[in-house]
Amino acid sequence: MNLTLRVWRQKNAHARGRFVTYEARNVSPDMSFLEMLDVVNEELIGREQEPIAFEHDCREGICGACGFMINGIAHGPKRGTTVCQLHLRTFRDGDHLTLEPWRAKAFPVIKDLVVDRGAFDRIIQAGGFISAPAGAAPDANAILVPKEDVELAFDAAACIGCGACVAACPNASAMLFTAAKVSHLGLLPQGQPERNDRVRNMVAAMDREMFGGCTNMGECQAVCPKEITIAFIARLNHDLLAASFKGRKPPRTAASP
């Protein structure tokens, strides 16, 4: 099959970008989208041209590094799928596809389709660690957790931090990501000691990174490759409201010798 690609090319965060058109010819419908880009890049390198920069790692739909926009949709038209797991059979022979990076102030472009998602890392860092002593691996079922809470915690922990929710949101909000990260610990017993401080600190970090506010558009859950729902945003808002009525923990001091 043959595809026409209109790709955003930008040398760095400070350079002006532009769309450049490339042809992907005689590619197999069984190729993944990234494999198709590999073929295009090999041709560009063979012509001594700069290859298209795009991020990837596992190529198994686990890490989320591969994300970018395809015809205005984060990760492309197939729901619950990352770009690396999106196959060309999803498209038609002769299709014209526009590829561009996530568009958000908090995700500055590094080059072409690659953006800096370090803002997500800083939100997670603001959440800190759990203070419950871990020790050796506990016996199975030593700490009883309701089945519903376990399943919700696993659903929230499925977030891979790809940034599709931010890219799809008209406000460039990171609420779905932050809600998932807050919830998967807040639902478990080990996450209770820092629960109030965690939600306050992570939401404050999200605001510092200049993400937009959530207005419940629902675009975030529509493009999430792990199909995380906006119900977690409601849970985050509940926790944040509850935490606002409770005092902060005093800062830790060094242990006396």
Image (tube, rainbow, N blue to C red):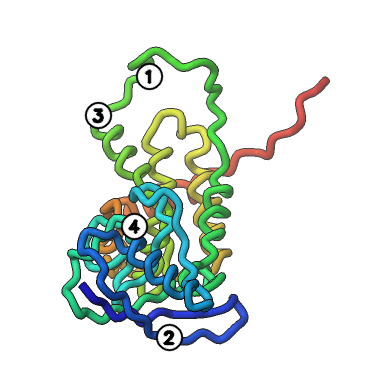
Inter-mark Cα distance, 3 to 4: 33 Å
**Image spot of residue 228 (x, y percent):** 29, 52
Q: Earlier in the sequence, mark 2 or mark 1?
A: 2
Give the amino acid at mark 3: Lys
Which image quarter is the C terminus in? top right
From the viewer's perspective, is the residue at label 3 or at label 4 nearer? 4
Q: CA distance from mark 2 to mark 4?
A: 22 Å
Q: Secondary structure at mark 2?
A: strand
Q: Quadrant of residue 187?
A: top left
184 or 160, nearer to the observer: 160
C-alpha separation, residue under disc 2 versus residue under disc 3: 50 Å
Of residues 248 and 34, the one drawn nearer to the viewer in this rendering: 34
Q: Which residue is mark 4?
A: 84
Residue at the right extreme, as displayed: 257
Question: Which one is in front in this view, the residue at disc 2 or the one at disc 3?
Answer: 2
1 vs 4, front mark:
4
Mark linked to residue 31: none
First of labels 3, 4 by sequence position: 4
Label 1 vs label 4: CA separation?
38 Å
Going from the N terminus, do you reach mark 2 or mark 3 first? 2
Q: How much space separates mark 3 and mark 1, taking CA atoms?
A: 12 Å
Residue at numbered disc 1: 143
- Image disc number at residue 147: 3
